[in-house]
Image (tube, rainbow, N blue to C red):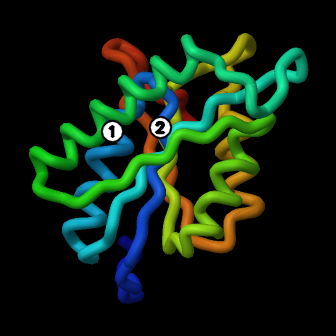
Amino acid sequence: MLRGRPQAPSSRLVLSLDGGPTDRLVIDVGSRLAQATNAELVAVYVVEVDWRHDLDDDLVESREHASRVLDMAESAAEKARLPMRTQLLQARDVGAALVDEAVSLGADAIVLGLPYRVRFGGDFAISRTILYALKNAPCRVHVVREPMPDGETRARGS
């Protein structure tokens, strides 16, 4: 929350899940925001479909993985006693699908996870999905980064 500026209550939060290391963090942050603002949670998993497949092809393995991730999200929401809907989408681009879904749901915010990764050369890596959401989402975008691995230190003077 920003100091000095009241935060408008959210009525719907879209949680972007991908089966990665930040999913639980996204769910936790989304749950805390939902509790504070009495918002509905919508967990969204987008299966990215490459050009070798049609968008409506049944990608069984990807859908099964996505279903497991969404089941985990529902269980976490149930434990927190929060209502949650889940959406499984197939699209060519995850960022565009996520923003389009947030718009169609009338979401007030999107919560995305950012794994702590460093590329060759030491540059911090931000995904195309996060960049797309930050640039194109008409609602707030919350990016939650996982903590640095033990033993890593932040470069001084950066």
Q: Residue at image x 33%, y 67%?
A: 40
User: Taking 30 as reference, is 65 above or below it?
Assistant: above
In this view, the residue in front, 131 or 13, is 13
Mark 1 highlights which residue?
A: 25
Instruction: Answer with mark 2 or mark 1, whichever residue precedes in sequence.
Output: 2
- Residue 36, horizontal then vertical, whole percent: 22, 72
Q: Secondary structure at mark 1?
A: helix
The numbered mark at residue 17 is 2
In this view, the residue in front, 11 or 57, is 57
- Give left or right: position of 80 versus 135: left
Amino acid type at mark 1: Leu
- Residue 94, horizontal then vertical, whole percent: 69, 39
Q: Secondary structure at mark 2?
A: strand
Q: Quadrant of residue 55?
A: top right
Query: How far separated are the C-alphas under marks 2 and 1?
Result: 10 Å
Q: Quadrant of residue 119?
A: top right
- Residue 131, horizontal then vertical, whole percent: 72, 47
Q: Residue at image x 47%, y 37%?
A: 17
- Give left or right: position of 27 versus 15: left
User: Taking 100 as reference, is 5 above or below it?
Assistant: below
Amino acid type at mark 2: Leu
- Residue 93, horizontal then vertical, whole percent: 77, 38
- Give left or right: position of 92 versus 134: right
